[in-house]
Image (tube, rainbow, N blue to C red):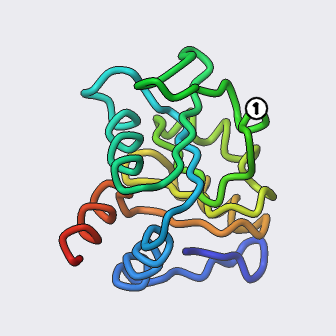
Amino acid sequence: MRRAEVASEEIAMSGAEILGQAKTTLAVPRRVAVLGASREPEKYGHEVFEVLRAAGHTVWPVNPKVTDLAGVPCYPDLDALPGAPEVIVLALAPAVTAKVAPGCAGRGAVVWLPPGCFEESTAAALAARGTEVLAGVCPVYVTRLLAAQR
């Protein structure tokens, strides 16, 4: 997690600390919104959706171009969700993440920015707004790591 102490000053955590926080976040079933969930199995958003769902999380796919994903209703945006997510995963291209990230702030959820899906400036902007951010670790990897340790 990264938090802003002052708007321009970010406190960076080590890789081990980030992984530890990621494991803590996914160690128990959570309500997770996956922005960028896709019907296409080769897409990262599809993999995130499937892996988190198989691990027992309540997963709400968010994609304005899809109505359902594997029999689960797909929502056009965060405001359409049936409840408040505890975790918001942005499985999107970095430019798209930069556009939608401000709408994730202030929701009381951990905003998860997987590798390859964000720019550092996006993570810093979220942290500056007081949003809890997990950046640079893959939720699929963390979920599989937790399963292997059980």
Nearer-the-camera pick, 30 or 109: 30
State which quadrant residue 103 falls in: top right
Rendering coords of residue 124 (x, y %)? 64, 63
- Which corner quadrant of the image does residue 77 belong to? top right
The foreground one among 84 and 35 is 84
Q: Quadrant of the N terminus?
A: bottom right
Q: Residue at x 62, y 42 (%)?
A: 98
Q: Toward the viewer: 11 or 75?
A: 75
The percent position of residue 143, horizontal first and vertical second, equals 32, 62
- Asked if residue 90 is positioned above or below residue 7 in the image, the reply reads above
Quadrant position of the C terminus in the picture: bottom left
Q: Which residue is mark 1?
A: 80
Residue 37 percent coordinates (x, y): 47, 32
Q: As drawn, which residue projects farthest toward the left?
A: 148
Which amino acid does the dot numbered 1 rest on?
Ala
Residue displayed at 64% across by 60% down:
86
Q: Secondary structure at mark 1?
A: helix
Q: Is residue 144 left or right of residue 25?
A: left
